[in-house]
Image: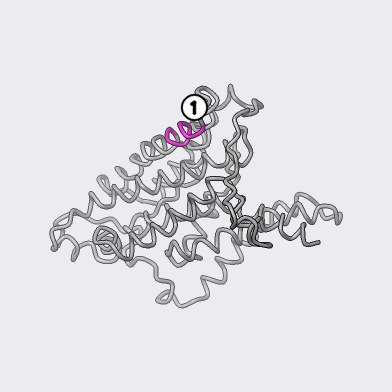
């Protein structure tokens, strides 16, 4: 029984890793006042690019870097539409999702069904991995897990303790006041959207070269939408996103544990998404003033406007 619990928690960490990466990126993006509903599409682009480059070169970290670059590049489209053109951010984000899913399906079509022979070995941390229970759960994981934790804490410190991070938060709260301090609001929003895209693409890379080690069209399976919901659930705080992401990672894992009980696999596959809807319902009942949402989220801002 103990081994089953440890294995379940260990897999929950793995399943929650891409959610944490994507959520952290979305937190940074939304803190600047830009809503990005294109996370799912950017994740798909990151997944297919990482897989293709890794299979072609034999170097998974080259695949990771290529995925981040591709995610940042395609996110510029949303930044341009939202910041420069001041288009509706919901429409622009949805368009980015459709573009990313369609483009990834086209690029990845020749690679469907081809397994990835290169394996990213787990990082077993000496001594710490020998700790009962926690050693196997937390200190015998793949590199993406440690990278996700590091980036989440770093992002929290960046947003809360650095001058640039405070300026990014300020652009999401009161861009007019921020502009009077000599800060280029548009530049910061561009930067935030592009960084968020890099995080989402990194999440996609984890799916294709570490989690499943294959490419299948639609492999993101709605994780981008869950990441957007987790951004709200975490109250736009990267530190809170850590436990929120791994909690939802558990929902992905528990469905496989319940299948032997005779429960319909189709029903069990709904669990992560039902949980997402339930959490959003609970959040909607709270006082909006206590949610810590950026005051100017999804609101366009024209420089110099009075």
Q: Main secondary structure of the magenta part?
A: helix
Measuring from the top left, give residue 157's x and y in whole percent. Answer: 36, 62
Q: Magenta residues, as a range? A: 60-66
Count residues near mark 1 (Cα–Cα under 10 Å), then give few for <14, some for 14-19, many for 20+. some
**Any magenta on residue 49?**
no
Measuring from the top left, give residue 126's x and y in whole percent. Answer: 58, 52
Colour mapping used in the image: one colour
Who's the residue at 58% across and 66% down the image?
Answer: 279
As rendered, which of 303 and 202 lies closer to the eye?
A: 202
As rendered, which of 232 and 91 lies closer to the eye?
A: 232
Who's the residue at 31% across and 63% down the image?
Answer: 296
Vertical arrangement, residue 112 with respect to residue 46, above or below: above
Residue at label 1?
53
**Any magenta on residue 65?**
yes
As rendered, which of 4 and 75 lies closer to the eye?
A: 4
Left/right of residue 301 with respect to residue 106 in the rendered view? left
Task: Check disc 1 and report its element: helix, strand or loop.
Answer: helix
């Amino acid at each position: 029984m103990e081994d089953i619990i440890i294995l379940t928690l260990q897999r929950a960490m793995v399943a929650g890793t891409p959610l944490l990466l994507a959520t952290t990126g979305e937190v940074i993006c939304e803190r600047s006042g830009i809503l990005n509903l294109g996370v799912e599409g950017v994740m798909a682009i990151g997944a297919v690019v990482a897989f293709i480059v890794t299979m072609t070169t034999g170097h998974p970290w080259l695949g990771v870097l290529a995925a981040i670059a591709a995610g940042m590049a395609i996110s510029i489209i949303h930044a341009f539409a939202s910041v420069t053109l001041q288009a509706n951010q919901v429409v622009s984000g949805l368009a980015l999702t459709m573009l990313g899913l369609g483009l990834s399906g086209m690029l990845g079509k020749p690679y469907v069904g081809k397994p990835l022979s290169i394996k990213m070995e787990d990082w077993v941390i000496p001594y710490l991995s020998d700790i009962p229970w926690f050693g196997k759960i937390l200190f015998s994981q793949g590199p993406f897990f440690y990278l996700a934790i590091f980036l989440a804490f770093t992002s929290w410190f960046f947003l809360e303790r650095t001058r640039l991070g405070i300026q990014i938060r300020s652009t999401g709260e009161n861009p007019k006041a921020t502009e009077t301090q000599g800060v280029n609001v548009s530049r910061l929003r561009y930067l935030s959207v592009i960084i968020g895209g890099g995080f989402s693409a990194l999440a996609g890379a984890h799916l294709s070269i570490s989690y499943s080690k294959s490419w299948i069209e639609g492999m993101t399976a709605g994780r981008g939408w869950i990441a957007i919901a987790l951004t709200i659930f975490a109250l736009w705080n990267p530190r809170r996103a850590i436990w929120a992401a791994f909690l939802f990672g558990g929902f992905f894992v528990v469905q496989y544990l319940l299948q032997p009980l005779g429960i319909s696999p189709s029903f069990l596959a709904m669990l992560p998404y039902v949980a997402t809807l339930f959490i959003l319902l609970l959040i909607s009942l709270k006082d909006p003033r206590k949610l810590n949402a950026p005051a100017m989220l999804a609101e366009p801002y024209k420089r110099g406007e009075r």
